[in-house]
Amino acid sequence: SNNHPPFFACRSSSKRRNSLWAELQPGYAAGSMARSKPTTKIRVRFAETDQMGVAHHSSYAVWLEAARIEWLRERVISYAEIERSGTSLAVAGLNICYRRAAAFDDLIAIWVSLDEVLSRRMTFSYILEGADGLLLATAQTLHIPTDRSGRATRLPEVWRNRLRSHVNNA
């Protein structure tokens, strides 16, 4: 039997965003403007766009990584410190639901939430919005702890305990 939680399916943007906001923001009510500040903001660089000036879909994975590392730094620990301890968090799954295109020089706000921390996996969710507040994408990543040789391993208890206190807290 498969014990991995399924990645979310891409649903209507307002339903998914409200559902994610509820997960990311305790006490969030659909339509409410009271939200926490984003984990990070990223401006779309020219190199991340195609010939039409639209951000390439592969750029989103890089933006998610930047936001996730910032989320870890602000709440738990520097990802560099986790790496120095001999553990890496390999991306084992990535799901992005694109809703609207981002273009060169757009400012993108990214919210991150840690959904799950187990000994052998962890899952993050993301909301990406343009400066106008419109939804660009929602995403989820699944991470497997690995040792220096790249073999799956258990997340050290010290990191697991520190991370668990931040599950579903933006």
Image: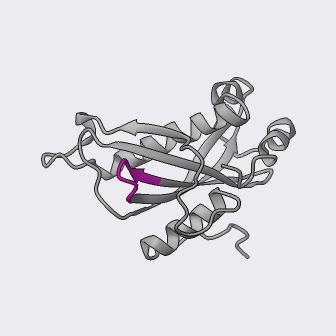
What count of labels does the image hold?
0
Q: Which residues are magenta?
A: 128-134
Q: Single out the residue that lies furthest toward the left.
A: 51
In the rendered image, residue 127 lying in the magenta stretch gets the answer no
In the depicted structure, whether residue 98 falls above or below residue 112: below
Q: Quick check: 8 left or right of 52?
A: right
Q: Quick check: 88 left or right of 101?
A: right
User: Which of the 4 image quarters holds residue 118?
Assistant: bottom right
The residue depicted at 80 percent of the width and 48 percent of the height is 164
In the depicted structure, whether residue 123 falls above or below residue 47: below
In the depicted structure, whether residue 124 falls above or below residue 63: below
In percent of width and height, residue 113 lies at 63, 52
The residue depicted at 81 percent of the width and 46 percent of the height is 165
In percent of width and height, residue 76 lies at 73, 35
Which quadrant does the N terminus fall into?
bottom right
Front-lying residue, 88 or 7: 7
Q: Single out the residue that lies furthest toward the front.
A: 33
In the depicted structure, whether residue 73 falls above or below residue 33: above
Front-lying residue, 64 or 110: 110
In percent of width and height, residue 34 lies at 58, 55
The residue depicted at 75 percent of the width and 44 percent of the height is 153
What colour scheme has been applied to the protein in the rendered image? one colour
In percent of width and height, residue 31 lies at 52, 67
User: Which of the 4 image quarters holds residue 45?
Assistant: top left
